[in-house]
Image (tube, rainbow, N blue to C red):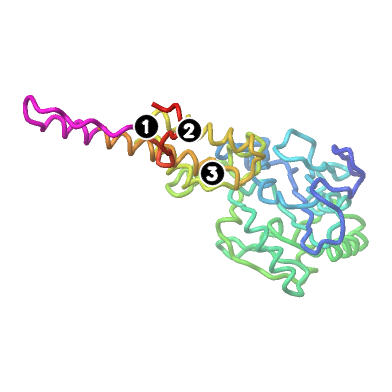
Amino acid sequence: MTAFETSGEPGAGTGPGQGSDPAAYDAVVLAGGAARRLGGADKPGVRVGGRALLDRVLAACGGARTTVVVAAPRPTARPVTWAREDPPGGGPLAALAAGLRPTTAEHVVVLSADLPFLRERTVGRLLGTLRAGGADGVLLTDPDGRDQPLVAAYRTRRLHETLARLAGRHGGLDGLPLRRLIAELDLTRISDPVASFDCDTWDDIATARARIREHGHVLDEWISAVKDELGIDLDVDPRGLLDLARDAAHGVDRPAAPLTTFLVGYAAARAGGGPEAVAEAARKAAALAARWAEESAASTEQGAAGAEGTAGSQPARPQADVAPDATPDTRPDAG
């Protein structure tokens, strides 16, 4: 039995556009389980980098046409369709069968909800390899070479067929392990020790939390967390914005840095949003900061020149402050 939180009919999808788009895919995220090695904690809700593990996985499959989460409904950063195996706790194959029912795409990504380092590019790699070959599925392997069938992309029809065959052979799917499914499929394997890292213990959680704060990771992690928290999906150039903040701090005043980046974001939103709007607003603000810096440098030079003048001599009159594109006033009544 499948329960739906969204208003659409089963298979209606939670993303853009139904149809025959060959690049379309669905996603099934298994977020149930007892989490015994975590002492029964709510593992999908455990936070790494300020975000629930489930939300991190949902961000990685954000391009899915339909995203089904097999678990009791809960607040999530992205819209999803909810499903439950009947009875709950029937095991991964029963959960997978329940999650597949609302899907309609030719390919489906199947994920667990405890993958802190999974990224959208890895999901794309799985799907690209599947589409380019003839295998039933493509899965990741961990550093020890073990299969990770819940970090994988499959041909949806083959999953339906294989699950039906297993259910007929065993009188149902309850309690059957994932290895029964894997043994029936022709699979391609990709080694990825980072994306395949899952959190089964509190030590794993601690490792994940430490890793995202390592140099070279923390900025990207923070930007992703903020975007999820604010409910925005916008790719921007963080280096360009950091350069703008630096220019504002050096050319104007240190507090100008955060205020300038805020105003750039506000201006981009008023202009319709999107990376192009952000880039254009940042360009204008950077040019303004540069003009401020030039004026400051010119004033400093003029002050130094005046101090060096001889006593009693008339200091040179500063050139009028005129914008580069200004023209003389030629009106008849101009003084």
The residue lying at 84 percent from left, 43 percent from top is 83
Which one is in front, 218 or 165?
A: 218
For label 2, count other residues whose C-alpha is less than 10 Å away and answer few (under 14), some (14-19) or many (20+). Answer: many
* Residue at the farthest left position: 311
**Residue 16 within the magenta-colored segment of the rendering:** no
Q: Secondary structure at mark 1?
A: loop
Labels 2 and 3: the sequence-earlier one: 3
Residue 259 is situated, as x and y percent measured from the top left of the image, at 48, 29
Residue 258 is situated, as x and y percent measured from the top left of the image, at 46, 31
The residue lying at 71 percent from left, 66 percent from top is 138
Which amino acid type is shown beneath numbered disc 2? Answer: Thr
- Residue 246 is left or right of residue 198, and the answer is left
Q: Which residue is mark 3?
A: 221
Q: Which residues are magenta?
A: 300-320
Q: Secondary structure at mark 3?
A: helix
State the mark number for residue 252: 1
